[in-house]
Image (cartoon, rainbow, N blue to C red):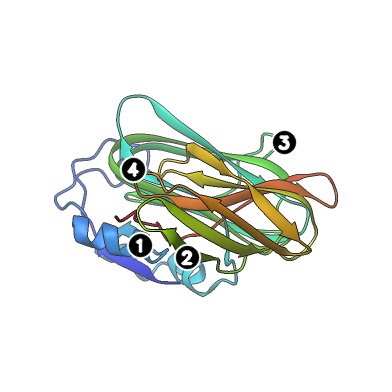
Amino acid sequence: MPLLIYAVQCAGQVVDSACIPRFHPDPTYIANAEATGGQIMLLDRSEIASPAVTRVYSAPNHETILRVSGTLGAGFKEFTAPVDSGVRSLQFTIFAECVKAITVTSPSGGVPGATKLSSGSIVILDAPEPGPWRVKIAGTGYFIAIAKGNGGVIFPPLRLERTRPGVEQSLVAYLGGPFDSAEFQVISRNGATLQVIPMAQMETEFRGVFTPPAEPFHIAVEGKDKQGLPFRRLHAPLIEAKP
């Protein structure tokens, strides 16, 4: 999955300090990264060779649990990443043009060690605690927060087929691993649920029809695993609804 690196130099070099970026991410880079399921990492030139950045790029964490992006304003934005019982490793990559604070909190309230960067934070964990992890971010400008895991419920690439041009699309999706229940949703870039997709299930295959929203969207699936813990998986590429 592609990772786009865009060098940003800020007046403040501490992750929880205010900063004024000398450069802004090019909107074309943002659009290309999000359309392909990649991520722009807002790095100072001195951070490109960071071991944490290298590990993120080479890690086997391919299942997207949380993916939100947009623009930060006043106050905090907070998001939840439900980690199911089968997840063996977990990583958070969180960046913003101007970062004031980033906090990743475990279900039991602990704050894991993080690699703090000039415009973001990276957290990489083995054997993460199951349950709802929380991401809290404050700052200004463009931001993107992603949590990815390895193991547990598997959400292979889905298939979208246009049934009535500009009106309806059919969705064919598959799930693997220890899932017990599943609900498919259309969600916005910022993580808001736009609609639930009625799906017919035949073992691990799911089929349904929905009306695409006017705004770009992701397809997500939520449910319970075999241990009764909530899970969430996202189709990482941002889908552009076109007439």
Query: Residue 182 versus residue 112: which sits nearer the camera?
Result: 182
Mark 1, other Cα within 10 Å: few <14 / some 14–19 / many ≥20: some
- Cα distance, mark 1 to mark 3? 34 Å
**Are the residues flagged by discs 1 and 3 in contact, CB closer than 8 Å?**
no
Identify the residue at horizontal 71%, vertical 60% (top origin): 153
Query: Residue 122 versus residue 1: which sits nearer the camera?
Result: 1
Mark linked to residue 70: 4
Mark linked to residue 35: 1
Identify the residue at horizontal 48%, vertical 44% (top origin): 187
SS label for mark 4? strand
Identify the residue at horizontal 18%, vertical 41% (top origin): 20
- Cα distance, mark 2 to mark 3? 42 Å
**Are the residues flagged by discs 4 and 3 in contact, CB closer than 8 Å?**
no
Q: Quadrant of residue 203?
A: bottom right
Decide if residue 87 is in sight here. yes
Q: Mark 1 or mark 4: which is in front?
A: 1
Mark linked to residue 161: 2
Considering every residue shown, the one lying at the far bottom of the view is 58
Considering every residue shown, the one lying at the far top of the view is 75
- Whether residue 152 sits left or right of residue 104 in the image: it is right
The amino acid sitting under disc 3 is Ser
The amino acid sitting under disc 4 is Gly
Provide the residue designation for mark 3. Answer: 108
